[in-house]
Image (cartoon, grey):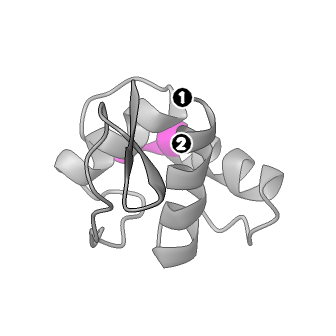
Amino acid sequence: PYRRQRQMCIREDTTEKLNVQFPIIRKNSTGSAVSMLQAMLQVKVDGIFGTQTETSLKAFQKNVKLTADGICGTETWKKVVEHMNADR
């Protein structure tokens, strides 16, 4: 599903690059960003950043050579998104 356009190969089944801001989330945070992180970490999705989410996030951070503090800030979100893109 590719087509040539201005000397670039563009996939027809993707959107343009999007700039997105994610909130800094940590234990006891709630909401859709927590649900999205939980889905990416493949833990129970309930929108509540509890112990299971924190433990899974710390393991992820350690695996990608980030400080395993259990806080999902800018650098952690970048790694989460990179990991999800690599799994496509």
Does 14 appear in magenta? no
Question: Which residue bears the numbered disc 1?
Answer: 88
Identified at 72% across, 64% down, the residue is 68
Q: Check disc 2 and report its element: helix, strand or loop.
A: helix
Identified at 18% across, 47% down, the residue is 32
User: How far apart are labels 2 and 1 at the CA level?
Assistant: 5 Å
In the picture, residue 19 is in which quadrant? bottom left
- Residue 3 falls left or right of residue 43: left
Residue closer to the observer: 58 or 40: 40
Identified at 60% across, 59% down, the residue is 79
Question: Which residue bears the numbered disc 2?
Answer: 85
Q: In which quarter of the image is the N terminus?
A: top left
Q: Check disc 1 and report its element: helix, strand or loop.
A: loop
Residue closer to the observer: 12 or 38: 12
- Would you say residue 39 is visible in this rendering? yes
Main secondary structure of the magenta stretch: helix
Q: Is disc 1 surrounded by few (<14), some (14 to 19) or many (20+) residues within 10 Å?
A: few
Residue closer to the observer: 75 or 38: 75
Q: In which quarter of the image is the C terminus?
A: top right
- Would you say residue 48 is visible in this rendering? no
At label 1, which amino acid type do we have? Arg
Task: Pinpoint residue 34: horizontal percent, then vertical percent.
Answer: 30, 48
Identified at 49% across, 41% down, the residue is 53
Dot 2 and dot 1 residues touching (CB under 8 Å): yes
Chain part drawn in magenta: 49-53
In the picture, residue 35 is in which quadrant? top left
